[in-house]
Image: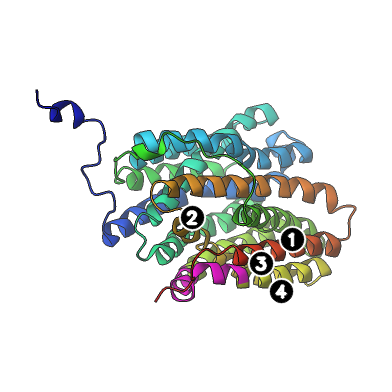
Amino acid sequence: MPPAASALPLPLPSPPLSPSPATADQDSRRAAIALGTTLPGDVVLYLLLPMFAANFGVTLAEAGMLLAANRLVRIAGYGWVAKFYARHGDRPTCMLAVVAATLCSLGYATLSGFWALLPLRLLWGLSFAALNLATQALATSVPQGAAARSGRSRAFIALGPVMALPAGALLAQVAGPRAIFFVLAVVASSGLFAARKLPRLAHPGLVATRPGPRMPTALDTWSFLEGFTLDGLFVIGLAFLGKDLLPGSAVVAAGVVLALRYGAEIVLSPVGGRMAERWGAERLLVSMSLLTAVALVGFGAGWLWSCAAAIVVLRALQLPLLAPIVAHRFPGPGRVQALAARSIWRDIGAGTGPLVAGLALPIVPSVWLYGAAALLLALAALACGRDRPAPAARP
């Protein structure tokens, strides 16, 4: 009785578990393009919903809840997304996420009211979780060049938002805030061409465990505070504080600044990845975070545009650092689970940041708010440096 016939179909590991660097580069690029085509619908909504809340049939408070909903759903949903990704692989997961993102953009163009838009925000949150997990997993699938590959991935992801934000701001002034989302739905659907070329291979070693928030490590705390400050307090503060400086064209100014944030990712995230390959991702994370803390203090103290530019640059350099750090500390199949867990902590911070900013900015001096956030971010970065398990530099 030959046992091989019943054993062969189960593990499915006959393709190489570790692809070549060239294959990893190609797969990482395709996943990043899929995310880059679907992301504009979300970032343009961040720009237009607070300024044109009435056009979407919501109040300003409801707009804040809608913008936070997509991140908050990922706190609970990342575990389910990781299981789906593990069972079905990159191609089915990313194709399904692209289709869902296309439907979300169509919904932003046609639906009104909090309860009509809320399911779209929840659906987008899960779609982004799937695409984001795939881009990070594929970028770190081969240890060789993982930091540089992560940097290039961030650049491809940023291409869509950097073009969509100014276009959305200008079109909103000409045709209202809804028309741009028809265009962005077409753009999102084009991500299927990249997603359908991704590998179909499942990741059976990941099915057993469910990533979720546990007692935070130093890296978890840093992920939370980076999301809280740079994706929460900073973005909302830029719109809140900037509207008084440029009241006549606030939507265009905010759109340009946010586009520059993504433009900096295109130029500087690959630079950050190469810097990490040379000097070590952990060491670079600490130094960049400390500089970001200084810029946050200046931002809150009133040097709005100069410090905003510095924060944009530093954020772009930091973006490719987390994935290779996690891959180094959690090698093997645990890499994807750990990436999902760090994303959960970042989403907790990025989801609560806008809520705190909306409540605190009207009543708390901005220098106090951003100074406190900067201090916490600096302390978390120093804790990550002390927690470094191995020499950082790679020859």
Q: Considering the numbered disc 3 on the image, is that residue within a helix, a strand or a loop?
A: helix
Q: Would you say residue 280 sits in the magenta stretch?
A: yes
Q: Amino acid at mark 3?
A: Leu
Residue beneath label 2, please?
160
Left of 354 or right of it: where is 3? left
The residue carrying mark 4 is 306
Q: Position of residue 188 (x, y in %)?
A: 45, 44
Q: Residues within 10 Å of mark 2 (few under 14, many from 20)?
A: many
Q: 288 or 177, which lies in front?
A: 288
Looking at the rendered structure, the kind of residue marked 2 is: Gly
Q: Which residue is mark 1?
A: 376
Q: Secondary structure at mark 1?
A: helix
Residue 48 relative to residue 282: left or right: right
**Chain-order first, disc 2 or disc 4:** 2
Q: Which residues are magenta?
A: 270-286
Colour theme:
rainbow
Of badges 3 and 2, nearer the viewer stands 3
Membership of 282 in magenta stretch:
yes
Q: Are marks 3 and 2 in contact (CB under 8 Å)?
A: no
